[in-house]
Amino acid sequence: QVQLQQWGAGLLKPSETLSLTCAVYGGSFSDSYWSWIRQPPGKGLEWIGEINHRGSTNYNPSLKSRVTISIDTSKNQFSLKLSSVTAADTAVYFCASFPKHLVPRIDIWGQGTMVTVSS
Amino acid sequence: DIQMTQSPSSLSASVGDRVTITCRASQTINNYLNWYQQKPGKAPKLLIYAASSLQGGVPSRFSGSGSGTDFTLTINSLQPEDFATYYCQQSYSTPYTFGQGTKLEI
């Protein structure tokens, strides 16, 4: 059974770069796409982007200019960087497994990391 | 982007009730529709994928239906642990998008 464990800085100042990492335990790293999703306080879910084990990425166009998702297959980890953050980027950030066989769906979620952007 | 619209935004119900939540896509998504349950302070949990397939370990009182643009999530015989927020999500094309959520309250 795949488990995801994520970590990263929880408090940032405006204009800084958000950096989060998610480790994948169990299962095969090549079986899925690996995604980041965020949820502002009291609001809904927003898909940020995804990467597969070959390093192929897809990003949400609304964030594409500021987002980089990378992967380290030797460590079974993938990471999110979001540059030039503002208060609007304050949210809980989730990493997730997004297998694409049959109908794609998010079957495993990380525990979430609350990231606050404040001066 | 494909817009996902859920209704209602909130719903009051009682234990034992049957409830239905609807989700409409702004364009056809075939059956590329998933449903998630989220409880406060927790990550969402996959309930239904491919519009009507029950995720392993999810109680059979949850069911989904629909295809194209209109979908429903039905919960039969509500249990206390079912009071949560429910989201639909399309996985037909990127950017994958979610509905705004339906909060199910007592």
Image (spheres, coloured by chain):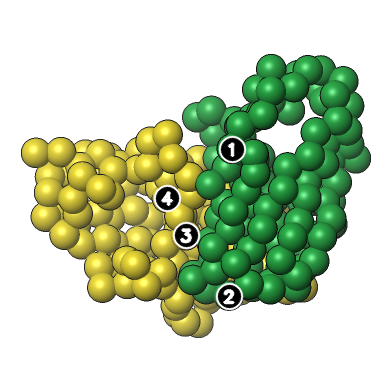
Chain colours: A yellow, B green
Q: Which residue is pictured at 87% across the width and 20% down the height?
A: B16
Q: Quadrant of the C terminus of chain B?
A: top right
Is disc 4 in the same subunit as disc 3? yes
Q: Which residue is pictured at 38% across the width and 36% down the height?
A: A41
Question: Between marks 3 and 2, how big is the CA–CA gap?
Answer: 12 Å
Marks 4, 2: nearer the viewer: 2
- Determine which residue is flagged by label 4: A38
Q: For the residue marked with disc 4, what is the amino acid?
A: Arg
Secondary structure under tag 2 reads loop
The quadrant where residue B20 appears: top right
User: Does residue A31 appear in the picture of this structure?
Assistant: no
Q: Residue B9, labelled with which disc?
A: 1
Q: Chain of mark 1?
A: B
- Determine which residue is flagged by label 2: B93
Q: Are marks 3 and 2 in contact (CB under 8 Å)?
A: no
Secondary structure under tag 4 reads strand
**Crowd rating for badge 3 (residues with CA inside 10 Å; few <14, some 14–19, many 20+):** many
Q: Which residue is pictured at 31% across the width and 47% down the height?
A: A8
